[in-house]
Amino acid sequence: MTIIKRPRRMRESSFSRALMRENNISVSNLIYPIFVIEGTGVRQDIESMPGIQRLSIDELIKDASECHQLGIPAIVIFPYIEKKLKTKDAREAFNYDGLVQRAIKKLKSDIPELGVISDVALDPYTLNGQDGLVDSNGNILNDETVEVLNKQALSHAKAGADIVAPSDMMDGRVGSIRKILEENKFINTKILAYSAKYASSFYGPFRDAVGSSESLGKATKETYQMDPANSDEAIDEVKLDIQEGADMVMVKPGMPYLDIVFRVKQTFKKPTFVYQVSGEFSMIMAASLKGWLNQDDAILESLISFRRAGADAIISYFALEVARLLKSKT
Ligand code: PBG
């Protein structure tokens, strides 16, 4: 048989596969999320996220240093807030001496070159685990919430955050935070907007990690996070955030929303990040621990899929492990 075009010819050896590889995953594409908790010497397991722990600030510095040494450009921090500090008005969110603010200060003084991203949202601080303030009927109050988010973002910037990342999905918050930062001369503080954030069931383990599942109970976030059925709406959300002054936009979750990552990157050609969320992490871990998946292979394949879809950077709970893996291969 004579076949002129044989696609398998290039797949035949490892060198030719390497030469035609269209995408790659490098440590510089990775962002590592870390959960921070009060105390010293604390490393607390999170049952639904095998291998991930809540760390006190001193322990956080150790893991952050390893990230920096391995070449991970930035970390993002999420707090586990003690029950007694949760209030209806979420005022702890903008306490300059709060847990997150202290973690940022310590990170910037000990490891100044490591990028620090802070989460701007009220869910760790509210009594009901919602990202916003609520009225007496339980409705999420948009504009009142944005006022608190402004204060929270400003307190993070003052503490030294390089990037503030509003993950709350209130309307108008990116523009409002940008204005506050400009007015206070934080002209280089970057905004990573969770622009297309879906009301997803894949956030479950994260809510355990930050201790908001209990507060949230059976309630949902569907009045502010997006409907998983929608795609055009994501384009609209991203467009607004870019107009309002976002430096980077994000799609979240990751693997179930690769079509959105692709569309957003193709449409706007802006720095486009993706969040491989806790549920995605836990699915891969659970199957790997059962011996049903090869853990390293499954992780790397999931990450390359984000790059192929167009993501510039990936927030992943696997980031530290992958950075170690990539280093061992070189
Ligand atoms: C809350 C927030 C969530 C995540 C990041 N910020 C959860 C939520 O919206 O309920 C999820 C991250 C993950 O699942 O890994 N503002």
Image (cartoon, rainbow, N blue to C red):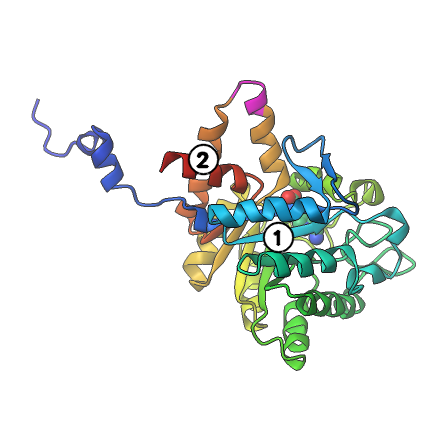
Depth check: give the residue in front, 318 or 229. Answer: 318
Image quadrant where residue 269 sits: bottom left
- On-image quarter of the C terminus: top left
Q: Position of residue 44 (x, y in %)?
A: 73, 36
Asked if the magenta segment contains residue 270, the reply would be: no
Q: Residues within 10 Å of mark 1 (few under 14, many from 20)?
A: many
CA gap, disc 2 and disc 1: 21 Å
Give the residue displayed 62% in from the left and 45% down from the top. 62
Depth check: give the residue in front, 329 or 287. Answer: 329
Q: Residues within 10 Å of mark 2 (few under 14, many from 20)?
A: some
Q: Position of residue 34 (x, y in %)?
A: 64, 46
Q: Amino acid at mark 1?
A: Val
* Residue mark closest to the camera, 2 vs 1: 2
Asked if the magenta segment contains residue 288, the reply would be: yes
Depth check: give the residue in front, 241 or 298. Answer: 298
Which range is magenta?
287-292
Give the residue displayed 53% in from the left and 19% down from the top. 292
Residue 199 shows up from this direction? no
Label 1 residue SS: strand
Q: Which residue lies most toward the top here?
A: 291
Is 311 placed left or right of 9 in the picture? right
Q: Position of residue 52 (x, y in %)?
A: 65, 36
Depth check: give the residue in front, 269 or 109. Answer: 109
| For residue 114, above or below residue 315 | below
- Residue 280: which disc? none
Mark found first going from the N terminus, 2 or 1 = 1
Image quadrant where residue 4 sits: top left
Q: Which residue is mark 2?
A: 325
- Residue 76: which disc? 1
| For residue 100, above or below residue 80 | below
